[in-house]
Image (tube, rainbow, N blue to C red):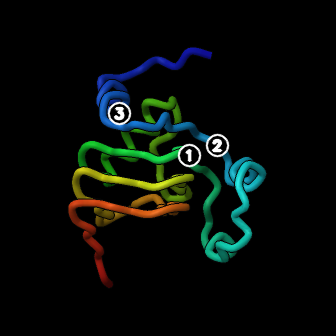
Amino acid sequence: MTVPRSTLAGVIDSNVSATPIFITLAAAKQQLDLSRYELFDELDVQNVILLDGDTYIKGDLNQQWAEATLEALGEDTNMEDTLILVNGNLTVAGTIKPSHDYFPHLLVIGNVQCDALQIKYN
């Protein structure tokens, strides 16, 4: 099925080295051994943006990036139950920054390198 692509989709395509795909958590667990990550028992994660392989993101990895990626994939942009899963190393030429409201959970099965990591404490 061809998904209509927005202007934001072009930004994602040109600034991310791996092709994001949208799958369920159940499908991710079938593809990858996630048994050592106990957090899935505690989190209400249903959907996964999978980046399979070493991934380079030019720009910030933030709520806007996640929303644009979901939109480009033709999915609902609600991120409350979404996980960004990188099966490889992640390099972000920018900041990894959660939003004030929602940010999808992030799991990198590899190393992370970024210009800055901004964490909000309650």
Residue type marked 3: Ile
Q: Which mark is residue 12?
A: 3
Which numbered disc, 2 or 1, marks the residue closer to the eye?
A: 1
Disc 2 crowd, CA 10 A, few/some/many (<14, 14-19, 20+): some
Quadrant in which the N terminus appears: top right
Q: Label 2, on which residue?
A: 23
Disc 1 crowd, CA 10 A, few/some/many (<14, 14-19, 20+): many
Q: Secondary structure at mark 3?
A: helix
Q: Secondary structure at mark 1?
A: strand
Asked whether the beta carbons under mark 2 and mark 1 sit within 8 Å of each other, the answer is: yes
- Residue 14 in picture, x, y percent from top left: 31, 28
Left or right placement of residue 15 versus residue 50 in this view: left
Please give the name of the residue rendered at 29% of the width and 74% of the height, measured from the top-left corner: 119
Left or right placement of residue 3 versus residue 38 in this view: left
Asked whether the beta carbons under mark 3 and mark 2 sit within 8 Å of each other, the answer is: no
Q: Label 1, on which residue?
A: 50
Query: Above or below — where is 87 with respect to 6?
Result: below
Please give the name of the residue rendered at 69% of the width and 51% of the height, measured from the top-left corner: 28
